Amino acid sequence: MPLKLLAQLSTRNLFRHRRRNLMMLLAIVVAVAGVILTNALIRGMQYDMREAAVANLTGHIKVLAPGYLDDPNIEKSFRLAPDWQPDVPAGEVEGWAARIRIPAVIMSERETRGIQFVGVDPARENISFLGDVTLIGEGLKDAEDGRVLIGVELARQLETEVGRRLVIITQGLDGKNREAGFRIAGLYDAEGTALEKQFVFTGVGALQKMVNADVVTEVSVKLQDDALVTDDKLELDVKSRLASFFSTLDVMDWQELEPQAAAMFVYVDSAILIWFLVIMGALIFGLVNTLVTAVMERIREFGMLRAVGMKPSAVVMQVVLESTIIMLVGVSVGIVVGWLLCTAWLGDGIDLSRWSEGIEMAGMRSRLTPRLMGHDVILVTVLSLVFGVIAALYPAWRAVKLKPLEAIRR
Amino acid sequence: MSEAVVGQTDVRTGGVHGFLIVRIGWRNLWRNRRRTFLTTGGIAFAVFLVVSFMALQLGQYDVMEENATSLLTGHVQVQHAHYPEDSRFEETIEHASQVLETVRATPGVVAVAPRVEAFALTSVNERSFGAQVLGVDIAAEQQTVRFVRMLASGHTLQGPQEAVLGTVLAKNLGASLGDEVVVLGAGKEGGVAALVFTVVGLLETGMADLDRALLLAPLPEVQAGFGLDDEVHTLAIRVDDLHRSQQVVRRLRAALPATLTVRNWDQVLPELRQGIEVDKMGGRIMYGIIMALVVFSAINSFIMTVFERTREFGMLLAIGMRPGHIMGMIQWEALFVSLLGIAIGLALASGLTLWLMNVGIYLGEGMQEYARQFYMPDRMYPAFSWEAMTVAPLVMLVGTQIAALLPSLRIRRLKAADALRAEG
C-alpha cells in the first residue's frame, strides 16, 4: 500500500476527533516548548559559567612557568620576546595578553588587604573581564602606566578614592620585599564583588620595574567563540602549538585551570538529556492513551480493511503514521512557541541580581539569557519522533492482534 | 449552574444516594482498564519523579546550611553595628567578656567563640604574604565550629606564641612546622602591631579562601599585639537547633545594646540563602512542567471518557438522574484515579528515597569540587520531609479533579433524547 494513501488515512483519522487530538497536540506543544525553553536557560547558564571562568583572567589557554599554580610568585616567571605573536591564524584568536600576576599586600592610610597584583597592557585586556567593566575615574593608559586601577569594593574597604595614593608590598625577583607607592587612576565596577576585592591592576612595564625583572608570569590566549563552536578540535590544536613553542613552560586550558566550571560544563550536557527523557516520559502516558483509544474505536474498521486485503504491516504503519504526524505538528509548533518564549519573552534575559551573591558563588552572571542551540533543537525533534513511534507500538499491536472476522463482529 | 448545584447538594445530603454514586464511579474505572492504568500511570510517574527529586533537593538544604554554618561562621554572629558593612578594625565589641556572659546565658545558645579579626603581613624568612589573622579562644572554637579541627599536620593551639596556618599560606611562605612567623599589622589607633609565633599546625579546610589566608593565634596575644583591650570583633554562636536560630537572634537582640548587631546565618552567608532560593525556583519550574503535562494527559483522558459515554449519560438522564449526579460520579472517578496514581507514585518514591538514604548518590570527581563550594558533602543523600511528600500529591489531586470537571461541564447541557441518539 502506498505510503501516501496511508498518510492520508492517518491525517483524516486525526481530524475525526479534533477536540481530543487538539488536547494531545497542546500537551506535546507544552512539553516541547517547555523543554526548549528550559534547555536554552540551562545552556545560557552553562555558557555564562564558562565565559565567567574564561574572563576571570584565565582565557581559553594559558602559558605559565612550571610550579606557578602551586606557588604563585615572581620567581615562577619567564621572558617573552617583545615581538612574540601566537602562531594561530587570525580569525581563530580573539586576543592574547601577557601579564605579571603576583600576590601582594595593599595599604591605604587606614586599612590593609591581601590582593593579586596584576601588571597588564590595557590595550590587550579586551579578552578579560577588564574589557567590560565600568570605570570611575580613568583607566590605565598603556603598559608603562605606573598608576593603579582598583575595584570599587576594595576602595570601599580601604576607604580610599580616585587620585589618592596606596602602598603596595610584593616580593621582587631576588626574594626581597619591594614597597612602592601608587596613585589610583580609577576604580572598576565589575559584576559582583569577588573580582573587585581580588585584583589590582597596573601597567605591566611599571610592575616589571618594581620587581626589577623583564619577565611575565602568564600569557593568556582567548579564542574566537564562533571558531570554537564550529571546530571542536581548535582548542586542543592551539594548545599543542603553544606547547611546542613554549617547550619549557606549562601550557594549560581553561578546563585544567578552572576544573569546577569545566565539570559543570560537562555535567550540563547529561542533565539536559535526562530532563528531556523525563518530560517525554510524562508525555508518553497521554500519547499512548490517546492512540489506543483511537485504535479501539476503529477496531471494526481495521477488521474490515484487513478483510478486504490490507496487510497487517500497513495497519501498523497507519497507526505509527498517526502518532508521527501528531508528534511532528506538535514538535513544530512547540519549537516555534519555545523559540518565541526564548526571544520575545526572555530575550533580554532574566534579572537574577536579587540573588547576586548566590549566583556569583555559582559562577553565573546576574542576567541569565536563554541560549537556544541548533543541535539541542535537532535532538529534541529527532528524539520526540522516536518517542512518537515507540508510543505507537502498543496501540499498533492492538490494531493487528484481532483476526479480521472477530474484529468485524465486535 | 443552579441545576448542577442542586444536584450536588442532593448527592451530599442524599446518604444512600451519594454512596451509590461513589460505587458507580469506582466500578466505571474498571470498564476501561487500559485507560485507567494509563492515566493512573501518568499520575504515578509525575508523583514519583517530583517526590523523589524534591526529597533529594530539600535533603541537601539542611546539610548545606549545617555544613556552611558549622564550618567557620557559626549559626548566629554578634558584631559592632557597623562592622558587617565596613569591616573596620576599630569597630569592636567593647567589654567583650561582659557581652560574652550575656550571650552564654541566653536560652538556646550552646557555645560562643570570641574572635579578633585583623589583616596583617606575615613573613617567614624573606617571604611575605598578606593573611587574615584570627585571634581565637581555641576551646570555645572547638565547641562552636569545625574548621579548627581540620588539621593537615601538627597540633592545634595549645600554648602562648603558637600559630596555626592555612596549608596554602604556609606553602606560599615556605613555612613548615616549628618555623617562626612574623606578623606585622596596623593596630588600633594607628599603632604598629608586631608579633612572632611558632607554627605548630597546618589547617586544611578545602575552602581555598581560608587555606590561602588564615592564621590562627591565641586571642589574648592578638588583642595585646593589636592594641585592643577587652574587645573582640565577632562572637560566633552555636545554637541548639539551626531551624530555630531566629528565636535566639530575637532574644539576643533584646538582651544586647543597640550598638551591636545580631545576625542570623542567612544574613551572614547571604550567598547560601540565595543559592537555595534560586535552586528552589529552578526546581519549581521543572516540577510545574512535569505536572502540567500529566494534567493535560488527564484532561485528555476524561475528554475521551465523557465523549464515549454520551449515550450512557443520555440513558441515565432519561431514567431521572440529575446532571449534577453524573458530574459528581465523574469527579469520584477522578478522585479514585488520582488516589491510585498517588499511592503508586508515593510508594515507588519512598522506596527509592529509602534506598538512596542508605547508599547516597556519587557526584563524580569534578562535581565534588563544585559541590564543596556550596558546602555540600561528596555524596548526596535525600531526606524525607512533609513538604517533599505532600506537594506533588496535592497538586495532582486538585489537577485531576479539574481535568475531570472541564469535559464534564458539557453534561449540564446534555438533553437525554439527543444524547441517546449520539454516536457511541
Image (cartoon, coloured by chain):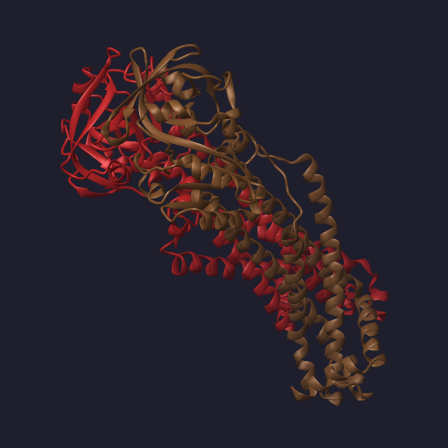
Chain colours: A red, B brown
Classify the position of the N terminus of chain A by image quarter. bottom right
Res A249 seen here: yes
A158 lies left or right of B361: left
Residue A311 position (above or below residue A237): below
Q: Which quadrant of the structure image shows residue B308? A: bottom right
Query: Could you tell me residue B291's position as x and y percent?
Result: 61, 59
Residue A291 position (above or below residue A174): below
Query: Could you tell me residue A12's position as x and y percent?
Result: 63, 70
A298 lies left or right of A199: right
Query: Could you tell me residue B21's position as x and y percent?
Result: 81, 77
A60 lies left or right of A341: left
Question: Residue at the spot x=37%, y=33% of the render?
Answer: B231
Question: Residue at the spot x=39%, y=13% of the render?
Answer: B175
| Total marks placed | 0
Classify the position of the C terminus of chain A by image quarter. bottom right
Nearer the observer, B386 or B415: B386
Q: Which quadrant of the structure image shows residue A252? A: top left
Residue A267 position (above or below residue B285): above
Res A238 seen here: no
Query: Could you tell me residue B266's position as x and y percent?
Result: 47, 46
Nearer the observer, B173 or A315: B173
Nearer the observer, B409 or A228: B409
